[in-house]
Amino acid sequence: MLTGLTGLMEVRIRARLRHAGQEVETYSWWTSIAVFLAIPVTQIVQLVAVLQATFLKRVAWRGSILEINGPNDIRVIDEEPPVLPSNDDITKAA
């Protein structure tokens, strides 16, 4: 369904651009087939990423390791202190 809607949108946009006097490059058959196959692959990758994030228990974020057991139950397993820039780094950046 998404492939059909994308194709319909592409046709309508190209028609408007032609009507406005802009030059529109035509698609080759290879490009059409590649787009047709890429849309379902993209949806599968998105689904896998969402499912993986849903069931993930441990997350490494900004140098810390967090354990997530629920929306209000988050524990810090390992935390590294933030590295602050030295005065030399600040004067070099300015």
Image (cartoon, rainbow, N blue to C red):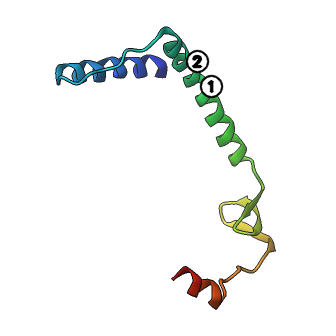
* Nearer-the-camera pick, 55 or 80: 80
Q: Position of residue 53 (x, y in %)?
A: 69, 48
Residue sitting farthest toward the top: 29
Q: Amino acid at mark 2?
A: Leu
* Nearer-the-camera pick, 63 or 49: 63
Report the side of 79 relative to 71 (left or right): right
Residue at image position (65%, 33%) is: 45
Residue at image position (51%, 83%) is: 94
Q: Position of residue 89 (x, y in %)?
A: 63, 83
Q: Position of residue 93 (x, y in %)?
A: 55, 80
Is the residue 58 above or below the residue 79 in the image? above
Residue at image position (53%, 12%) is: 30
Answer with the quarter of the image where residue 59 lies.
Answer: bottom right
- Residues under numbered marks 2 and 1 in contact, where contact means CB atoms less than 8 Å apart: yes
Residue at image position (49%, 9%) is: 29
SS of the residue under disc 1:
helix
Q: Position of residue 28 (x, y in %)?
A: 46, 11
Instruction: Kindly identify which residue carries mark 2.
Output: 37
SS of the residue under disc 2:
helix
Q: Amino acid at mark 1?
A: Val
Report the side of 7 relative to 47 (left or right): left
Instruction: Kindly identify which residue carries mark 1.
Output: 41
Q: CA distance from mark 2 to mark 1?
A: 7 Å
